[in-house]
Image: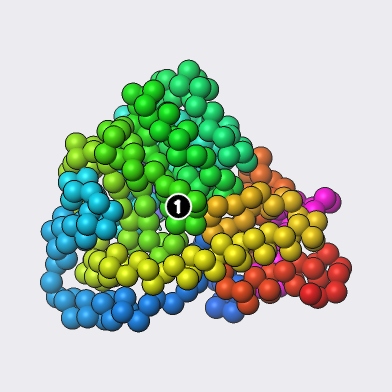
Amino acid sequence: MSGTKLKSVLSSFSQVPGELKPLPSDRRSLDDSCVRLHTTENPFPMPEVVMQSAIAALEQQYLYPEHDNIGLREAAADAYDLTKDQVIAGNGSSELLGLIYRAFLAPGDSVAMLSPGFSFNRKLAMLQGAQILEFGCGQSDVLPVEELLSGPAEGAKFILLANPNNPTGTFVSVADIERLAAQSDRLIVLDEAYVDFAPDNGLRLIDHYPNILLLRTFSKSYAAAGIRIGFGFGHPEIIGRLRNIQNVFNMNVIGHAVGVSILAHRDAYEENHRHIKQERERVSVALSQLGFSVTPSHANFLLARVPAGQDGRWWQKALKRRKVLVAAFPESFLKKHIRVSIGTREQMDILLSEASEILGRPKQ
Ligand SMILES: *Cc1c(COP(=O)(O)O)cnc(C)c1O
């Protein structure tokens, strides 16, 4: 009986969310002893001074957080040499991605996205009744500017570029992005989630190109994925449209305090960024010696084609049995690849020795 009622309730809704695959129910079944290298987190402790700001913020638990994230936006504007009207703060940059899709797309519209890209975008487009037009740059560091200008981007409402890209770790030059921004009259959403591990960034384009909307997050390079702090930087008109449709109190008092404190102590993270870049090179060489083919990366992860004979999913399972978690992409053309985040030296040594054992070699 209740089954029939449920059916009739569900059938009265728009079909789109129903087309999404149900979420797996076992997400949290992973115990703490696993080495987590599947979600591009940065497993480093907060600097003491940042931790103290979080603890102090707990005393404001009975207050609503500051309106429109004003203090955090001002602090970010100061730190990145922008005005506060050029800044929006999000509960992670994925909240801001969601706002962008809702603000700028109607059913039937399309978005051009670098492929392979961050899969969350596909879900956002589907919810909006929009289409993703993927354009290939694959695992190369060259942005196909001309192809974009005359091809998919022509009809698209915006162009989505993650730079460095996820899951490849590749990085296109800021000069290429600038060329695209200069020649296109489309909005370019430049998702710089991993840019602190890269040689350059697009911040200097903001004041020159009103069609650039830059996204940053503190989840990766500032090791704060659990606190949820993201930013959008762009023209005040574009930023204003996003702020206008944002939930009130989208962030909480701890996110505000930690965000402001991280902005004031960015130098405390330099050692961490150095470590990740060095470890990225060391693990890249070691994986190559084991027969993996590693895409040169400018992020805090490596995309590696697995040795001949198996696919990425097989390796993901084999490593999981040994309590090492990595990402695989069974439904894409990256079937033969795994993505491995760069964590502590100890975590990376565990990955390398388990991979050697799987290959039947003595532990390193
Ligand atoms: C992780 C990630 C994000 C979003 O991170 P948040 O934790 O929501 O700030 C956005 N874009 C890319 C490409 C990412 O990999």
Residue 175 among magenta residues? no
User: Do we see residue 22 in this rendering?
Assistant: no
- What residue appears at the point 66 percent right and 44 percent down from the top-left corner? 334
Q: How many marks?
A: 1
Q: Which residue is mark 1?
A: 195
Side (left or right) of 80 relative to 154: left
Q: What's drawn in magenta, residue-wise?
A: 306-324
215 over 186 or under it: above or below: below
Where residue 157 appears, x then y in whole percent?
36, 27
- What residue appears at the point 49 percent right and 27 percent down from the top-left corner? 145
Q: Nearer the viewer, residue 329 or 230?
A: 230
Where residue 89 appears, x then y in whole percent?
26, 54
234 over 257 or under it: above or below: above
Where residue 63 appears, x then y in whole percent?
13, 72
Q: Residues within 10 Å of mark 1 (few under 14, many from 20)?
A: many
Q: Quadrant of the C terminus?
A: bottom right
| SS type, badge 1 | helix
User: Do we see residue 228 in this rendering?
Assistant: yes
**Residue type, label 1:** Val
